[in-house]
Amino acid sequence: MAEATFDQRVWYAVAQIPAGRLATYGQIAELIGAYGCARQVGWALRRLPLPTPVPWHRVVNAQGRISMSPSREGSDWMQRQLLLAEGIAVDAEGRLPLRRYLWKAPQPPLG
């Protein structure tokens, strides 16, 4: 069986984030063993074929903000609406209470 691509590893990790929780791009990078590749995680999420069951909207930047940018072609506003629908408060500038909603990924067993 072929090894999963970087994008597939990102998508699988993001699929684990439960509703009402958030993760950062850097957290996902670390989770898949790609420390320092937060920006690449963002690009992998942009390449998701839509519609998708992968909850891409639950991934935000390390400052606890939605990365708002015209280059996102409206997905930043879509992300805000999806998070609000899950009960996560997001202000008009895309700021949210990251500490309160940060997901703690399960750790693999030692041994």
Image (spheres, grey):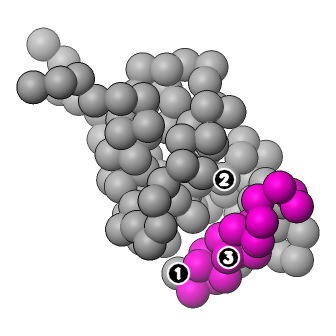
Residue 78 as seen in the image, left or right of residue 30: right
Q: Nearer the viewer, residue 42 or 83?
A: 42
**Residue 68: % across, % down:** 84, 60
Q: Look at label 1 and name its amino acid.
A: Glu
SS of the residue under disc 3 = helix
Alpha carbon of mark 2 to alpha carbon of mark 3: how far?
A: 13 Å
Q: Is residue 88 above or below residue 33?
A: below
- For the point 30% across and 41% down, the residue is 106
- Which sits in the foreground, 49 or 23? 49
The residue lying furthest to the bottom in this view is 85
Circle 1 crowding by C-alpha within 10 Å: few under 14, some 14–19, many from 20: few
- Judge depth for marks 1 and 3 and give the one in front: 3
Circle on res. 78: 3
| Residue at 77% in and 66% down | 73
Residue type marked 3: Met
Locate residue 83, reporting x and y percent.
61, 75
Residue interval drawn in magenta? 69-85
Location of residue 93 by image quarter: bottom right
Residue shown at the point (72%, 42%) measured from the top left: 62
Left or right, 8 with respect to 94, comes to: left
* Amino acid type at image mark 2: Val
* Mark sitting earlier along the chain (1/2): 2
Mark 1 or mark 3: name the one nearer the start of the chain: 3
Main SS, magenta residues: helix
Q: Read off the residue under disc 1.
A: 86
Q: Disc 2, disc 3: CB below 8 Å?
A: no
Q: Is residue 111 above or below residue 20?
A: above
- Residue 103, relative to residue 80: is it above or below? above
Q: Which mark is residue 60?
A: 2
Residue 4 position, x and y percent, is 28, 29
Identify the residue shown where x is 83% and y is 55%: 71
